[in-house]
Image (cartoon, rainbow, N blue to C red):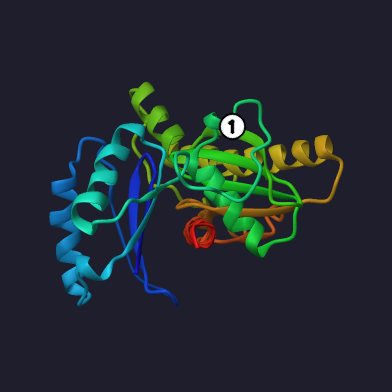
């Protein structure tokens, strides 16, 4: 079985694939100082609840945008699974070209999303990932990663608004009933929600104009579901993009080894 670890700046996902399907998924808050021993205590309890154990896991793949965490995640795999993990950006072969000036600077999550999207949707693609940051990435028709855009995430913007303005409260993100708010909370919700819809629509329009070719737009990430039904600029909402990409990269590397 495969243990896939996808670590973002806010949350870390652990998922188990038995060769046929994903049989378990768990999330925890990302803590860059968490040790391999701390991970294993937490993970062993969750595995036991599913009737699983570490001995059944014979492969591991790691995607992380938190460099200081990779050492401990790698030790988790080496020490407790007795397997050398595939790490995106290090020893994992993607099977696609990275056509940017400094390929080493491309985030692991963005590369994995490119692989996952190219498996299902016809290119060229615009892949939007709404997390701590909101990224817009270009995937060529042949699956190559060709760069993109990085903007602050919607939660990050909302947090900055609350912390920088003394009278503005912390609010929940939701689609407001109207564009023009009638009170402070309504005005903030509209600014955050419809502001991000305008950001998404505006950047998609500019990307398509610059590329001068038809493009399919795919959205993923923890916040993307909030935008479903609010804009026609996004063609597909796909919450499984990253995990699909991790599984495919593991498959490609397994084939290379045989």
- Residue position for label 1: 103
Res 57 quadrant in image: bottom left
Q: Residue at x 59, y 53 (%)?
A: 115
Say above or below: 137 vs 242: above
* Residue 19 location (% of width, % of height): 42, 74
Taking depth in this image into account, of 38 and 131 the one nearest to the observer is: 38
Residue situated furthest right in the rendering: 212
Q: Is residue 89 visible?
A: yes
- Judged left or right of residue 17, residue 243 is right
Q: Nearer the viewer, residue 80 or 145?
A: 80
Instruction: Tally the marks.
Output: 1
The part of the image, by quadrant, that contains residue 14 is bottom left
Give the vertical position of 62 relative to 51 (above or below). Answer: above
State the quadrant of the N terminus: bottom left
Q: Secondary structure at mark 1?
A: helix
| Any part of residue 187 in sight | no
* Pointer 1 local density, CA inside 10 Å: few below 14, some 14–19, many at least 20: some
Q: Position of residue 200 (x, y in %)?
A: 64, 42
- Identify the residue at image location x=40%, y=28%: 160
Above or below, 209 relative to 56: above
Q: Is residue 198 left or right of residue 247?
A: right
Between 3 and 182, the one lying in front of the other is 3
Q: Which residue is at the far front?
A: 258
Whole-percent x and y of residue 204? 72, 42
Q: Residue 82: percent from the left, percent from the top?
A: 24, 56
Decide which of 198, 244 is in the foreground and name it: 244
Asked where in the image residue 183 lies, by quadrant, the reply is top left
Residue at horizontal 21%, vertical 68%? 55
Residue at image point 25% right, 50% down = 78
């Amino acid at each position: 079985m495969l243990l896939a670890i996808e670590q973002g700046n806010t949350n870390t996902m652990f998922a188990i694939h038995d060769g046929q399907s994903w049989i378990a998924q768990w999330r925890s808050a990302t803590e860059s100082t968490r040790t391999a021993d701390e991970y294993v205590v937490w993970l062993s309890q969750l595995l036991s609840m599913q009737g699983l154990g570490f001995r059944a896991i014979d492969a591991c793949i790691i995607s992380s945008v938190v460099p200081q965490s990779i050492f401990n995640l790698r030790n988790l795999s080496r020490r407790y699974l007795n397997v050398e993990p595939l790490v995106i950006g290090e020893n994992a072969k993607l099977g696609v070209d990275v056509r940017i000036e400094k390929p080493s600077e491309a985030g692991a999550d963005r590369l994995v999303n490119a692989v996952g999207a190219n498996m299902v949707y016809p290119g060229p693609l615009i892949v939007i990932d709404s997390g701590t940051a909101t990224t817009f990435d270009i995937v060529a028709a042949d699956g190559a990663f060709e760069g993109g855009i990085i903007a602050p995430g919607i939660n990050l913007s909302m947090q900055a608004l609350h912390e920088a303005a003394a009278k503005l409260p912390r609010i929940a993100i939701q689609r407001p009933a109207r564009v023009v708010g009638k009170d402070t909370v309504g005005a903030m919700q509209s600014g955050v929600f419809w502001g991000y819809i305008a950001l998404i629509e505006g950047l998609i329009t500019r990307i398509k104009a610059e590329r001068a070719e038809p493009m399919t737009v795919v959205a993923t990430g923890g916040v993307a579901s909030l935008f479903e039904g609010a804009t026609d600029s996004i063609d597909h909402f796909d919450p499984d993009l990253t995990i699909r990409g991790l599984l495919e990269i593991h498959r490609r590397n397994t084939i290379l080894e045989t």
